[in-house]
Structures are given as C-alpha cells and as structure tokens.
DNA sequence: TTAAGTGCAAATTATTTGCAGTAAG
DNA sequence: CTTACTGCAAATAATTTGCACTTAA
C-alpha cells in the first residue's frame, strides 16, 4: 500500500464515516448540520463504540480541522442523549462520559488516566440483585469496575 | 416517656455521639478539632451509616447550631476519605456523595430526589466479573441501582 | 512551640444559558 | 421563510486553593 493509496483510502473512509454519521442522525430525526455530521462521524464513523468527554470530542473534531464550539459539543452530546443515540455515564464527579453503546453494559474505569472503556458484558453475571423498594422500579444498573495499574 | 426525659436522652445521645465521633477520629489518627468532632458526631454518632454531600452535611451541622465553613466541610470529608474513614461515591456528575460505610456494597440512587441509600448487599450476587486487562487489577466494583418512582 | 487545621474569598473546572446570527427543510 | 441550530461570552454550580489566623499536642 503506497502513501497515495493510503490517502485515497483515508478519503473513502472519511466519506463513509460522514455517511454513517448522517444516517445515525437520520434514525433519530436530527438535522444533519455540518457540526453534527462532523461529531457524529467521529463517534460512529467506523462502526466502533466510543466513550468521549465533551473535551475529548472537542479536541478530536479540532484535530480534524473542523470548527465547532465547545458549547455546541456539549449541547450536541446532550441532544444525542435525549434522543437515545448515546448514554451518559458518570464515574468520577469531575466529568461526564458519553457512550455510543446504549445497551446496559459494564465499564472499566482506568483510575490513572481517567479513561473509560467497555468491559465485556458476557463476562459479567449478576444472578441476584436487590429488589427495588416499594413504589420504585429499577431504571438501570450501573456497574463500573475501577482499575488500578499494577 | 416525658418530654423531660426525652430532652435528657437527647443530651446523653449528643454526648455519646460526640464521644463516638472522637473515637472514630482517633482510630484514624486525626486531631479532634471542634469542627471535626461536630461533623464526625453527625456522621457516626448513632452508629448508623450515612450518605452525605458536602452541602447536606454543611446544612446539618448548621442546624445543630455549630459554625463550620463549607470549605472546611469539603476539606474534612476529603480528609476522612484519605484516611479511609469514608468512601466517596459518584453518581450523577453534579455532586459527590460520601459514605461512612467503607465496605464495598451496592447503592440505590433515587433519580427524583437525587439521594443515595444503601442497597442490601446480601441481595446482590455477582458470580462472574470481567477480569482486569493485563497490567491492571480491580480496585473496586461500583454498583449503582438507579431507581425511578413509579 | 509548632505543625496541623480552619475560614474566608478568590480561583478553577465542568457545564449551561441567553441571545443574536445562520442554515436546514 | 421559519424554526431549529450554532457560537460566543457570560452565568452557574461544585469544589479547591492561597494565605493569614488558630489550636491541639
């Protein structure tokens, strides 16, 4: 693979990413504005799940040469959550993480770097869970496995 | 039980609470300053576990007629965590909860009121958990059961 | 006496909001 | 066109910090 070919591939990937981003927005009925497509293609462009903070996504979109304000990143992530495209996860009171995987699944939190990754949900088996007190129902069960580098 | 007796009991309770608070501080080698004893006796004075935020503890200590600044409440809670007297729990990015129960145990988070309570740990049974990736070890497993009033 | 602890106000950090301009349907 | 969206700068909320003063040991 030559440099040339690689660049071509990059362009194709980027086109595909944008297309995926746009489709993703369309499924939720959100307008595909320039900013949203830029953010969406970073989030779901390669079909992988992502865990981002507003800051990290803001940095990523800027690295890509796109101009999107931080406030818009915040508002957009919140909009994505509201329509169910993403889930918000809170781990260490300081910042919120946004996850493109909206299924209930456990997370690894790396204490040293402050990053969040998916933990394999097949490897988590909860056989019994405290029942909700009267008048309440379980909305979700958040499992965060905190990791310490050894 | 007359009112009189009740008041006497209150005084006794308060004395006992302070004593427990002081002992609790002593076990961690922390100086029993006026402020710390006031906070500690609210936290462990009756032998029950407590879940507080800096704000709620600040309000409680003021209701008791004690003068402790909010910054000191924050610093003190952090000091208690550092020496292992309490654990910090983060649930919804906006505020930190501090728990006098330092054992690993699940929590209920009431979405409507934003309060945190203990969930019975006997009722939680996790039989399999994702193993830590290479080079890492599990520091703790946080389980938060989010409750929605129905 | 002296290092640890405290209080205040200012600083920081993460996030939200008001509002005037811009663009998608 | 017209309503949703965006950008900026200012506002807010939770928490931390610098520093002079106080107090437990």
Image (spheres, coloured by chain):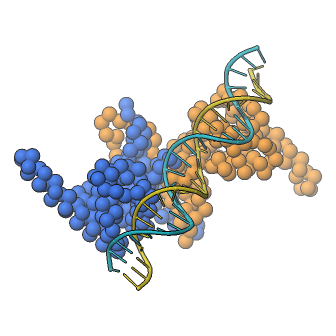
Chain colours: A orange, B blue, C yellow, D cyan
Residue B94 x %, y %:
50, 47
Between A16 and B77, the one lying in front of the other is B77
Q: Residue furthest left?
A: B1
Q: Is residue A103 left or right of residue B12?
A: right
Question: Can you say whether B30 is above or below B129 in the image?
Answer: below
Number of marks present in the image shown = 0
Between B104 and A46, the one lying in front of the other is B104
Q: Quadrant of residue A115?
A: bottom right
Quarter holding the N terminus of chain A? bottom right
Residue at screen point 49% across, 64% down: B138
- The answer to whether residue A150 shows anywhere in this view is yes
Residue at screen point 71% across, 47% down: A58
Between A147 and B86, the one lying in front of the other is B86
Residue A12 x %, y %:
84, 43
Quarter holding the C terminus of chain A? bottom right
Residue at screen point 66% across, 27% down: A29
Q: Is residue C20 left or right of residue C8?
A: right
Q: Is residue B13 left or right of residue C1?
A: left
Residue D9 x %, y %:
70, 42
Q: Quadrant of residue A69?
A: top right
Q: Is residue C2 left or right of residue A120?
A: left
Question: Can you say whether A115 is above or below A33 in the image?
Answer: below
- The answer to whether residue A20 shows anywhere in this view is no
Residue at screen point 26% across, 69% down: B23
Between A150 and A58, the one lying in front of the other is A58
Residue A98 x %, y %:
60, 45
């Amino acid at each position: 693979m030559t440099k040339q070919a690689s660049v071509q591939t990059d362009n194709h990937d980027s086109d595909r990413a944008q297309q995926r981003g746009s489709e993703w927005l369309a499924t939720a009925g959100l307008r595909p504005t320039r900013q949203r497509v830029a953010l969406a293609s970073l989030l779901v462009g390669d079909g992988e799940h992502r865990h981002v903070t507003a800051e990290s996504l803001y940095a990523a979109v800027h690295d890509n040469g796109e101009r999107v304000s931080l406030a818009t990143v915040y508002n957009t992530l919140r909009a994505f959550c509201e329509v169910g495209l993403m889930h918000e996860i809170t781990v260490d009171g300081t910042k919120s993480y946004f996850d493109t995987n909206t299924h209930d699944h456990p997370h690894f939190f790396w204490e040293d770097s402050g990053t969040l990754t998916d933990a394999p949900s097949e490897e988590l088996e909860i056989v019994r869970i405290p029942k909700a007190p009267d008048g309440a129902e379980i909305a979700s069960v958040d499992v965060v496995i905190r990791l310490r580098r050894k």
